[in-house]
Amino acid sequence: MALSIFYQFFLLGCTSFGGPAAHLGIFKKHFVDNLGWIRNEQYGAMISLSQILPGPGSSQVGFAIGLERGGIIGGIAAFIGFTLPSFLIMLMLAMTTSQMHGALDNIISGLKLFAVVIVADAILSMANSFCKTIPLKVVTFTSTLILLTFPNLHAQLWLLASTALIACIYRFSNVPDSPKTITSTPNWPVLALFFGLFVLTFFSLPNDTFAQFYQAGALVFGGGHVVLPLLQNTVPQLAQESFLTAYAAAQAVPGPMFSIATFLGAELDATHSIISALQATIAIFLPGLLLMWACHHNWQSLSSLPRFASITAALNAAVVGLLGAAFYNPIWQSAIHSVWHIAAVIAGFALLKYFKPPIWMMLLLFSVLGMLLPHLP
């Protein structure tokens, strides 16, 4: 059973371009419509839960499909199968970038411009989904201002904690009070493991790879794009250029965007790049997978609680602000250096928004632009 699960997810891991939304569509077609492994209602529940938990949404849903199909061994097999292709590609890119740096510089510059387009599109779509009321828009605006003024991990932690506290008092969601009681409880040992590891990371050595990437993975609400600003603050010893290169590379490979950790882990320790990359990859995925394991059987009971729904809505609005701050620094500042860059980003955004070409076509276009733009006056 585990081998069958691994095989099916490995095939998808080799071909799933386009980000989390595309992955979820591919999963539905493959596992619900074609293979019939889970019912449509089960799949919808998995997606709903992934939206309210921190972590990589599509990887969490894939893990949950494996859990339903083959228990925890099936969940692990699904995760490894879906993540392995992107892990290997990102590791290879990280290990060869230094040797090919001159040849790749212009292409990477073009991919950074594509990152500006992708993040702008993500901010707009997330704002449309998570900021539908004036109070939630205020949360987003305030979060952006705070993180532009104080761009560090402590500010992010205080912001998320304060937002959750305010949401306990002021209701940000429209979930009505209900006499319904919780009919199932989380897997408490797994939940305790998640929180225990999170607390221990703050007592680790300052440059401990597992601790840095685990902290980022535990705080990523709102999708893979948000991982960039979190990693910049949890892994301060890497140059800004490394983050943008890794982010651009993550756009170009199939599989989850959290594979950015593979690239950065290899960059952290060039002498033991494979071990460091593996450690970073496991650490950044582990929090989201533990939470999915702990909660996937009682998500409906939790989501019916007004206070829980309020906290979720407020945190989602706050991470839109976090991503908005990261859009300016470092993404815009690192990628935009001329009026031609601005023109390329505007044209690329219009192309993506109105014509919706496949991601591989956009990647190819911006790679070519990266080689042409240095020759323009």
Image: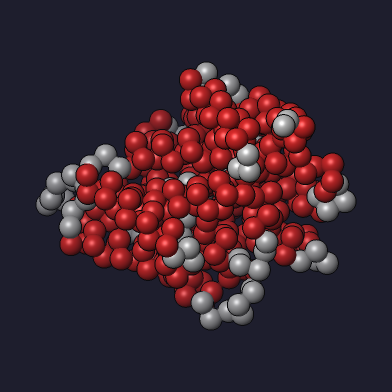
- In which image quadrant can residue 142 be found? bottom left
- In which image quadrant can residue 308 be found? bottom left
Q: Which residue: 19% across, 46% down?
A: 175
Q: Position of residue 275 (x, y in %)?
A: 75, 64
Q: Position of residue 5 (x, y in %)?
A: 62, 41
Give the position of the C terminus as an image quadrant. top right
Q: Position of residue 354 (x, y in %)?
A: 48, 20
- Relative to 318, does residue 362 appear above or below in the rendering? above
Q: Position of residue 235 (x, y in %)?
A: 61, 66
106, 220: nearer the viewer: 106
- Relative to 73, does residue 34 appear above or below in the rendering? above
The residue sitting at the front extreme is 377
- Left-right relation of 165 to 82: left
Would you say residue 5 is visible in this rendering? no
Q: Which residue: 62% across, 49% down?
A: 334
Q: How are the colours assigned in the image? A: secondary structure
- Left-right relation of 296 to 74: left
Give the position of the N terminus as an image quadrant. top right
131, 67: nearer the viewer: 131
Q: Which residue: 60% across, 42% down?
A: 336
- Left-right relation of 155 to 37: left
The residue sitting at the right extreme is 99
Q: Which residue: 52% across, 59% down?
A: 230
The residue sitting at the top extreme is 355
Would you say residue 241 is visible in this rendering? yes
